[in-house]
Amino acid sequence: MSEEKRLKIAIQKSGRLADMSLQLLEKCGIFLEKSRDQLLCRAQNFPLDIFLVRDDDIPAFLSTDVCQLGILGQNALLEKQALGNGKFNGLKQLLPLGYGKCRLSIAVPHDFTYDSITSLKGKVIATSYKGLLSQYLAKQNIKADIVTMEGAVEVAPRTHLADVICDLVSTGNTLTSNGLAEKDVILHSQAVLATNQIMDLEIKLLADKITSRIKAVLRAENSRYIMLNSPTDSLEAIKAVLPGSQSPTVMPLQGRDDMVAVHAVCEEGVFWDTMEELKANGAKSILVVPIEKMLD
Ligand code: PRT
Ligand code: ZN
């Protein structure tokens, strides 16, 4: 009997994306046989194996078809594609996942005069993102020297290894505490689901299934279920205020001719000002609740 085919996904073993990536798979209903120290984790209830690896290695796992799906920072994928001599060109981003958000930015010491990108002409720039930085500079027609550093890029100007840096920034605290100011953003990045060109039809079906579960989880996380009572004559005004909802359900309220109940799925955040606007239009008993699962 031939063995059951299993889809393979690579995620970060430890680091900024590790926990969220594992949680995302769990939210897709995947139960894992816990063994986080090992390279491989088997899903109990889905033909899926999870490879726990360094984020930088994920493009190679995909390009060699050891894995067919991967979760990694867009920055890491695009950097490999920028440097890889075509080796990673067949990889593609399927979905942005909404976490691990950061930007790849040029940052300069406070005593460095930066008017525009042209201020970098002839300067030395330290970075771990040589590929993306070179592409950016070439596009702007700027010639500069790039020093590649694997980590602690932010200390390069202080130690006179470089004039300025190009590094990932999220809160900006690292830059501030190293006396650097963010100037130009080269790339806005977040975690993405990536894939190779899956040839095996059965594996492709499994990958499509996981992808649509991830999509559904992300949609549900961004959506809210809203319930309220609306005066019949301001129903249209209230419907217009409901954020990102298509066709709300309108139901009679027992014993009331002047009020109806309105239920809607809002695929955008429902903020206090929206609720206040609903109230100003006559809405009563407004309830906003999270949605656990959603499938069309
Ligand atoms: O071991 P492995 O190689 O897997 O991990 P790693 O150390 O290479 O990666 P890790 O876990 O640091 O980052 C994984 C991914 O998280 C990155 O590829 C990005 O897509 C994303 N990410 C999001 C970040 C940041 N935010 C971030 N702030 N990656 C790194 N940083 C670093 C940045 O390099 C700088 O040193 O955090 C510092 C700046 O942070 P702030 O908050 O002070 O601005
Ligand atoms: Zn890494």
Image (tube, helix red, strand yellow):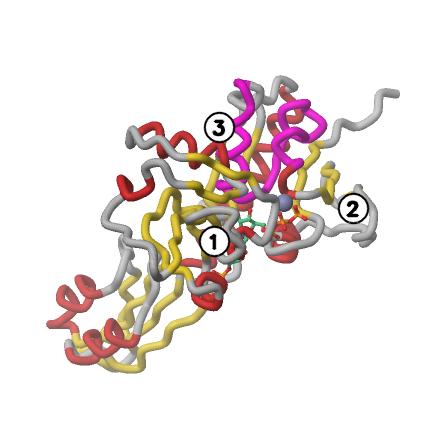
Residue 171 location (% of width, % of height): 45, 64
Compared with 12, 201 (above or below) is above
For the residue pair 21 and 232, the one nearer the viewer reads as: 21
Q: Answer with left or right where residue 186 lies relative to residue 85.
A: left
Q: How many marks?
A: 3
- Residue at 35% from the left image edge and 31% from the top image edge: 143
* Stretch of the chain drawn in magenta: 57-86
User: Of the residues shown, which amino acid type is indicated by label 1?
Assistant: Pro
Residue 8 location (% of width, % of height): 70, 34
Q: Answer with left or right where residue 211 lies relative to residue 236.
A: right
Q: Secondary structure at mark 1?
A: loop
Would you name the residue on which mark 3 appears? 82
For the residue pair 147 and 29, the one nearer the viewer reads as: 147
**46 within the magenta span:** no
Question: Does the Cβ of the disc 2 residue fall within 8 Å of ligand 1?
Answer: no
Would you name the residue on which mark 1 appears? 157
